[in-house]
Image (tube, rainbow, N blue to C red):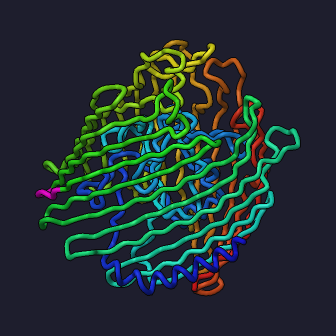
Amino acid sequence: MFTKKLILAASLSAILVSQAAYAVIGPIKITLNTEYRTSNPVIGDIATTIKLDKSEIRATGARTFTGLLQSIPSVSFEGGQGNLRALRLRGNEASHTLLLLDGHKVTITGSQPNLDVIPLDQIERIEISKGPFSSLYGPGAIGGVIHVFTDKDINSITSSKIDVSSGSKGTVKVNLNTYFKNENSYFDFAATDFHTDGIDALGNGDLDPIDRTTYGLNLGGQITENTSISVNLLDTKAIIQYDDPYGSPVLPDNNLKQMNLGITHNYGKRSKVSFDIMNQDIQRRTAKYELNTITVINEIDLDNSKLSLGLSNSVDKDLNNLSTPSVAKKIKHTDLFGQWQGLVADNEISVGARLIDHDKFNSHITYNLNWAKDLTLTTRVNASFGSATNLPDHYKNNANIVAGKTSLNPERSKNIELGFTNNFKWGDAGIKLYKSRVADAFKWQSGSPAYYINDGTVNIQGAELSIGTELFGWELDSSIDFNKAIAASTDLQKGRRPNRSISLNLNKSSEKWKRNINWTAHSWVWDKDNHSNGKNGGYGLLNLSTSYDFTENLSAYLNRNNVLDKNYEMAKGYDTLGKTTTLGLTYNF
């Protein structure tokens, strides 16, 4: 069935390319820089950001988006196949990580971003930015932002590609991508079918398979000399089985449909305005939500600086409860935000603020101030200070309304960061020190019915050290991270947050061969915030991957993950994937 759909999709895309590519004229959608929410920042990176392009994603050997996140250093991932997934940045809660898809928030379900709806094979690149970003992207970005881009490389020539792979645990994947670009326009269509038999996470004989089918469409161009347009569509449907920790019946549906319409108009040599409308439908465990966002951003280029001013309106609907008067039906907020970035006497500075007018929490402001300076040609220092908020999602809002508890305050954080990097003859090294304070932290309160309260303050501090060099012809990137997240109310380390993690990544390329070695390790963690459930042991994972180009158009790749077949737990009682092997072929035509 899916093969027939791929053939139909390829035929349809060929027809559309031959016709729509000339109807939609123009170059092309400009890709965001996550840190500055603009396509062409004036200054260099200041925030701590991990960036992965498509080749680097493949080199990890990951088979799913959540599998990829598990291999990234300095992030704390939990859940694994067979369990709900969560990701924590710098010791923060999973709900403090804002998940963006092509510049837009993926609505919160189950009190945290639904990482399972993101299709790995249609990702062009990922940027993981650490620290508070609420002044740029709105509430939720206390710990940081995971930004997934599906936009394709606009410098590519017209081409098509098919990727087929098979591996352990009954894993099979087929991906088709066709891309067209002429002088004035582009068109991209992708389709992916993925299946894996999964594992028996609880040891009860019940496998946890995944079946996902995804279609993506990106097209755009210039409709006048100064006006360009872009359309992005993503439709993913997934059946993801897992073992519910409370013994409830498993409802495995995880679906996402998102459409973006963007228009950019240059109204002067130094000024442009961008208008973007987004509609997103998401379904998880039969619960349905709809998020609609309209954003207008005006950018003005000044001498050695840039000013951005924006307006955003967001309406997040809980479609399950629209006819239930006792619970909230919508979460709405209208935001005004601005950012200035520029050079002042060789100092790189960015200043931003956001006024959030929320329908349930009135108005509040978040802000950020970032600074960096190149002391020499090889030495750079930076500092950041900012605030962020996290607002109750539908689940928390509805639980508290049903329980008659309507005094819940939003979580608020303040964060400071200092950094130093230096390029030596043998390579480069850097250190980042950070400290944050999260006030009015949310806490689940048992009862009949249960509800949420504000549970004081969480104090977080840590350090991140990185070294990059060349070793016997291999490119080596390594990092060591230290973190403490202490709840003031108990003076205990928060659960599932490792105090230490380390990553080593080695890459080597020759004319036809590419090889990658990745090793990540995490220290032991407490399973629960109150330490009542004991510890989850530390672990290290060794992943190997290689690829070989037979011809200019045909290549093969082999990935061996968890080569040492390490048995470990991310959550108490849940086993994770053992050793896996994936063999694949990619053909360009």
**Residue 437 seen by the camera:** no
Judged left or right of residue 581, residue 488 is left
- Image coordinates for residue 471, horizontal then vertical, percent: 56, 61
**Viewport quadrant of the C terminus:** bottom right
Residue drawn at x 62%, y 31% is 496
**Outermost residue toward the right in this view:** 205
Please tell me which residue lies in front, 239 or 93: 239
Residue drawn at x 48%, y 68% is 217
Judged left or right of residue 369, residue 129 is right
Please tell me which residue lies in front, 491 or 31: 31
Please count the marks in the image: 0
- Image coordinates for residue 475, horizontal then vertical, percent: 53, 63
Judged left or right of residue 277, residue 355 is left
Residue drawn at x 58%, y 58% is 236
Q: Is residue 110 magenta?
A: no
**Viewport quadrant of the N terminus:** bottom right
Q: Is residue 28 above or below residue 298?
A: below
- Image coordinates for residue 451, horizontal then vertical, percent: 55, 19
Please tell me which residue lies in front, 13 or 345: 13
Judged left or right of residue 333, residue 395 is right
The region drawn magenta spans: 300-304
- Image coordinates for residue 551, horizontal then vertical, percent: 62, 87
Q: Main secondary structure of the magenta part?
A: strand
Residue drawn at x 63%, y 81% is 587
